[in-house]
Amino acid sequence: MPTVPEEAVFNPINPYGRSKAVVEKVLNDLAAAGGFNYVSLRYFNVAEADREGRIGGGKEDGAET
């Protein structure tokens, strides 16, 4: 599974990703103001079907999710 380093460019490519980025920036601002700590879990493709067909019933490219 590929990983993305923390230093990677933060450039979401769709509305879902942009909404997650906005929330993460707000949390960052709150933490910078003091008295607030957070952890951001950057999940993606959490609903995609298994490509080998063992679970889910999706298409090869996962376009239905």
Image: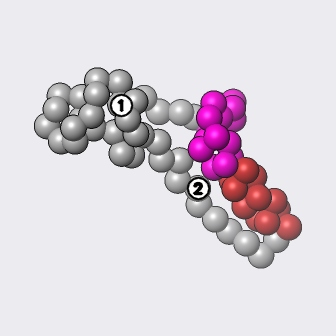
For the point 47% across and 33% down, the residue is 3
Task: Name the residue tied to disc 2.
Answer: 40
Look at the picture and state if 14 lies above or below 34: above
* Precedes in sequence: disc 2 or disc 1: 2
- Residue 1, image x, y percentages: 36, 31
Question: Is 30 a magenta residue?
Answer: no
Q: Secondary structure at mark 2?
A: loop
Badge 2: residue crowd in 10 Å (few <14, some 14–19, many ≥20): few
Image quarter of residue 49? top left
Provide the residue span drawn in magenta.
6-21
Question: Looking at the image, is mark 2 or mark 1 nearer the viewer?
Answer: 1
What residue sits right under mark 1 in the picture? 62
> Which amino acid lies under the numbered mark 1 shown in the image of this protein?
Gly
Task: Find residue 55 and report its image quarter.
Answer: top left
Q: Confirm whether the magenta stretch covers residue 12.
A: yes
Q: Residue at coordinates 47% horizontally, 42% vertically from top-left? A: 44
Q: In this view of the protein, which residue sits in the foreground, 7 or 22?
A: 22
Quadrant in which residue 14 is drawn: top right
